[in-house]
Image (cartoon, coloured by chain):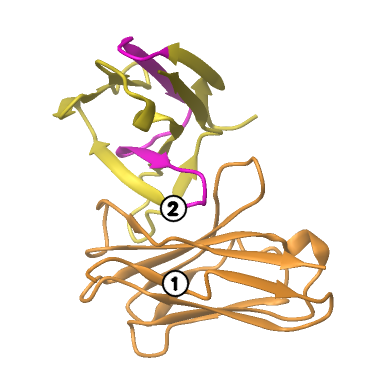
Amino acid sequence: KNEVEQSPQNLTAQEGEFITINCSYSVGISALHWLQQHPGGGIVSLFMLSSGKKKHGRLIATINIQEKHSSLHITASHPRDSAVYICAGPYSNFGNEKLTFGTGTRLTIIP
Amino acid sequence: GAGVSQSPRYKVAKRGQDVALRCDPISGHVSLFWYQQALGQGPEFLTYFQNEAQLDKSGLPSDRFFAERPEGSVSTLKIQRTQQEDSAVYLCASSRQGGVWEQYFGPGTRLTVT
């Protein structure tokens, strides 16, 4: 069982819809990363957060440490948001902050 | 170019060949990570460097895999006697220093073993 679980695995929505992607983890993650991966492989870091909420443009990420749950929201979705979104966390293990990744959510926004 | 770069971007190797994949991290970044991403899967950890020290190589799948970062900047991942199951995208990431910092990813090297 993956220690970082995402849902849904696939999500198709119309342009303009509000999108929510969820991430749950079962281990002591010290901070959670949300990453975006476009076809072709390149990964871009969207957020790193250890508490509360962060916002960047139309993207909002929240985390509840007690419940070990994080969400990524996209407002006013656009076809260019189509990508795979991955959550990942480093274990709280000083000296090595390797990431454990979720399986990803493939988002497709239809014009 | 201030980002993480990797070369080559694509590599096709015949089974049994040795390959070397290069990662140039962001200048001054202390930590460097290698990840392997099989088709349709999330990335998985291979190895981690802090400066030139390889602090964790627990994710390397076999002794055919070897990584180095001799001067604490550029890193090379070497795979000896490649096998078909080695086909994957190899991602390199760097972060500012030890501890939990945002990791910056390179574009990856897509390795295909035929």
Q: Which residues are magenta?
A: A14-41
Q: Are marks 2 and 1 on the same chain?
A: no
Q: Nearer the viewer, residue B62 or B24?
A: B24
Q: Secondary structure at mark 1?
A: strand
Callout 1: residue from which chain? Answer: B
Tell me the shade of chain A: yellow
Image quadrant in which the C terminus of chain A is located: top left
Residue B6: image tag: 1
Residue that mark 2 sits on: A42
Tell me the shade of chain B: orange
Residue type highlighted by circle 1 = Gln
Point out residue B36 in the picture as x, y percentages from the top left corner. Answer: 58, 57
Point out residue B49 in the picture as x, y percentages from the top left corner. Answer: 41, 72
Residue type highlighted by circle 2 = Gly
Q: Nearer the viewer, residue B87 or A80?
A: A80
Q: Is residue A27 visible?
A: yes
